[in-house]
Amino acid sequence: MNKIFIGADHRGFALKGEIVEYLKAQGYDVYDVGVKQLDPDDDFPKYARAAVLKLLAADYEDRAILLCSSGQGMCIAANRFKGIRATIIWDTTEARMARNDDDSNVLCLPARVLGSNRELWQDIIDTWLNTPFAAAARYIRRNHELDKLT
């Protein structure tokens, strides 16, 4: 994996800063697509779009992480784009399954739930980044089917 694109709205802003520092300390090449300054009136779709467009133009192995209060809005916005498999993750089991079975390329985190639990969000991110896609025929077929949906 070469790059991680990360974006958040105002509700994910503080946690995004912690995650950027953590990922950089782990040696990842992190690209912050915003929000760059706390703006209580911002809207999440533009940050999801910015991260996803960067990801779609990047290498297959690159990933994105998106944060908002629940993770739901970012996930909905990201999954509007063909080739994106965004998943909301709240524990390491889901992180493992999302990568292994679904080849998740966008991790959506609920800042409201995870913000105060540094150990948990680190474990989730580490699991998600380090779990390979199993590439079973049925998983590949399902991802192709997703890309054909309109």
Image (cartoon, rainbow, N blue to C red):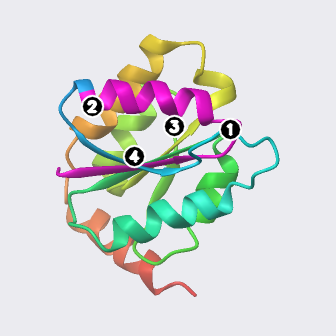
Camera-side mark, 2 or 1: 1
Circles 4 and 3, Cβ within 8 Å, touching? The answer is yes
| Quarter the C terminus occupies | bottom right
Q: Where is residue 19, by image quadrant?
A: top left
Q: Residues within 10 Å of mark 1 (few under 14, many from 20)?
A: some
Q: Nearer the viewer, residue 141 or 13?
A: 13
Return the residue at label 1: 38
Give the secondary structure at mark 2.
Answer: helix
Would you name the residue on which mark 2 appears?
24
Residue 89, disc = 3
In what element is the residue under mark 1? loop
Q: Could you say where residue 99 lies in the image, as x and y percent from the top left?
A: 32, 47
- Which mark is first along the chain, 3 or 2? 2
Front tag of 4 and 3:
3
Q: Position of residue 6 (x, y in %)?
A: 44, 47
Give the side of residue 102 with respect to residue 74, left or right.
Answer: left
What amino acid is labelled 3 in the image? Ile
State the separation of the CA atoms marked 2 and 3: 21 Å
- Mark 4 or 3 closer to N-term? 3
Mark 4 Cα-neighbour bin, 10 Å: few <14, some 14–19, many ≥20: many
* Sequence-first tag of 3 and 1: 1
Q: In the rendered structure, which segment of residues is drawn in magenta?
A: 1-24
Tell me the distance, in whole angstroms, between the alpha carbons under discs 3 and 1: 24 Å
Q: Nearer the viewer, mark 4 or mark 1?
A: 1
Marks 2 & 4, CB-CB < 8 Å contact: no
Asked whether the viewer can see residue 142, the reply is: yes
SS of the residue under disc 4: helix
Residue type pointed to by label 4: Ala
The front one of 33 and 146 is 33
